[in-house]
Image (cartoon, rainbow, N blue to C red):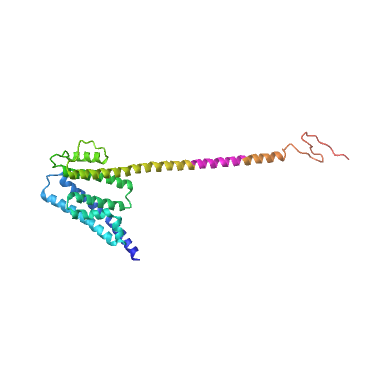
Amino acid sequence: MPGMADIRAKERWERRTQGPLLLLSVLFAVAYAAPIVRTDLAPWVRDVCRAVEWSVWAAFALDYAVRLRLAPRRWAFVRSQPLALLAVLLPLLQPLRLLRLVSALLLVGQRARMASRVRVTTYVAGSCLGLLVFGSLAVLEVERNSPDGNIRTLGDAVWWSFTTMTTVGYGDLAPTTGLGRLLAIGLMLSGIALLGVVTANIAAWFIARFDEEDAAERQQKAAIEGLTAEVRALRAEVAELRGGLTGSGGPGDGTVTGGAVTGGTGHVSSPRS
């Protein structure tokens, strides 16, 4: 069947490109962070970082196009992954570094969810770390040169991102630009969602542990009940055996005819002629 062949080809493509795309995402992270952390970089280094960002985005866009081409039902594939399509189109509509960052995060997250060896806990932990790091870098890039801004260093940005993700919001640091506030909204919504997933995972872990303990306790109780029943059956058999011995007479009871002992007195009667 051509449909099955396309599905197998799509699975092979996803399996073979999983590792290289994740490595490219790390390269994108370095290229995005370097010009923000080091403001004194040479112009050619900034150009290289920009080229790396576009190259990584192009690689993910190509991956999306290939998977769309190999999908048996292409329209269903597009409808099932709207964020991936949005991530591919965003940098084309508005070539901003921030949009390339959002695009890369969406595409990397989408491919990470497809990895069979990535557990939910690992995915959530990586997502939280990624939001914290890239949220800090993005707000620092936006707010650093704002006249009224108070987020000037990477440490300030990390502190602000952490308090924003956890919805604590001390208020000592806050974005003043429109783009910075949009970042804050996205970070708050993402933080609430991820922390909800973390809480649900912790609760599920405790419930699973309690279920295991309850199952072990039920097995132990069943084993004890089985042993109790066997002991009762053995007691009944012993009592039955004792009753049988008592009903058939003891070793000192009985009569002996023809000069044998009669009764239990030991009197011997001789036979008459």
Residue 271: x %, y % from top left:
85, 39
Nearer to me, 73 or 127: 73
Q: Kindly identify the residue that appears in the image at 71 percent across and 40 percent down.
A: 247
Residue 263: x %, y % from top left:
78, 36
Nearer to me, 224 or 94: 94
Q: Is residue 108 left or right of residue 258?
A: left
The answer to which image quadrant residue 250 occupies is top right
The answer to which image quadrant residue 21 occupies is bottom left
Q: Which residues are magenta?
A: 220-235
Residue 159: x %, y % from top left:
22, 38
Q: Is residue 267 left or right of residue 182?
A: right
Nearer to me, 35 or 147: 147
Residue 19 visible in image: no
Q: Kindly identify the residue that appears in the image at 66 percent across and 39 percent down.
A: 242
Residue 246 falls inside the magenta stretch: no
What is the tally of numbered marks visible in this picture? 0
Would you say the magenta stretch is mainly helix, strand or loop?
A: helix
Q: Find the residue positioned furthest to the left.
A: 43
Q: Find the residue positioned furthest to the front.
A: 178
